Image (cartoon, helix red, strand yellow):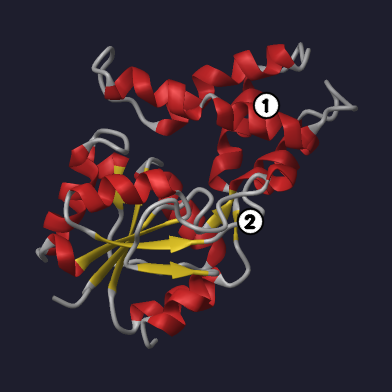
Amino acid sequence: MSVRALVFDVFGTLVDWRSGVAREAASLLAPYAPNLDAGAFADAWRGLYQPSMETVRSGRRPFVDLDTLHAESLPDVLGRFGVAGVPPGVAAELVQAWHRLDAWPEVPEALARLRGRFLLAPNSNGPVRLMVDLARRNGLVFDAVLGAGYSRDYKPKPALYRDAVAAFGFTPAETMMVAAHSSDLEAAASHGLATAHIARPHEHGPAGGELTPSLPVTYAAADLADLANQLGC
């Protein structure tokens, strides 16, 4: 069957999380840490992303959204960098940095091209409001918002992929997961979804990013515009 819907990983695939978080951290924390290595700060915070979600995935706690998890992990990151005296209001604003990320340059136009042929939705670990804020900030138009806020769990748990298929009413083969992370695509493929890998060589700044998938995929693209080209959009 031909693909009819595309569901997207967002952090790293559609938006540049590292640059955005570093920018916001440098600005908001300047009075408390004028010499902060903001890129390293963003990396450290992102490093707590999977462990924090695992507390929910494992069943050790009920579902809480990613904003809550980011707020809970922030004091640890501040402590690692010796940043003290940050008022609660500033800390709360820093959590909102994840709502103010910029899309990779080609994404808005490429998404518009893809939407002419396919139904589109984020399938992210971010909550609905975060996805809406990123879409409005970057001019991204989706047909639905799926993912953790919809399925009440975190990738790579099966619900996120199965719910993405069911939401549009298509078969798994008619639904394609688009991501810059092979682990996400591996999980999607295990539930029968088609897969598209997007190379993001600068996702982690100097540490790079995935240039090619580590497993067979339906499509492998240099960026989202390249995927749109391959799909005839």
Q: Which mark is residue 82?
A: none
Question: Residue at left 76%, top 12%?
Answer: 85
Q: Residue furthest right?
A: 35
Report how many numbered discs are placed on residues in the image: 2
Vertical relation: 165 (above or below) 59: below
* Amino acid type, mark 1: Val
Vertical relation: 206 (above or below) 137: above
Which of 45 and 206 lies nearest the eye of the viewer?
206
Element type at mark 2: loop
* Amino acid type, mark 2: Pro
Mark 1 or 2, nearer chain start? 1
In the figure, residue 98 lies in which quadrant? top right
Which of 30 and 8 lies nearest the eye of the viewer?
8
Q: Which mark is residue 90?
A: 1
Question: Residue at left 33%, top 25%?
Answer: 64
Disc 1 crowd, CA 10 A, few/some/many (<14, 14-19, 20+): few
Q: Position of residue 88 (x, y in %)?
A: 63, 18
Q: Is residue 231 left or right of residue 36?
A: left
Screen quadrant of the C terminus: bottom left
Question: Residue at left 13%, top 75%?
Answer: 1
Which of 163 and 139 lies nearest the eye of the viewer?
163
Q: Which residue is mark 2?
A: 201
Question: Residue at left 11%, top 56%?
Answer: 166
Q: Position of residue 6 (x, y in %)?
A: 30, 66
Disc 2 crowd, CA 10 A, few/some/many (<14, 14-19, 20+): some
Q: Is residue 113 visible?
A: no
Give yes or no for contact between labels 1 and 2 (Cβ–Cβ under 8 Å): no
Vertical relation: 109 (above or below) 6: below
Element type at mark 1: helix
In the figure, residue 60 lies in which quadrant? top left
In front of the other: label 1 or label 2?
2
Which of 41 and 137 lies nearest the eye of the viewer?
41
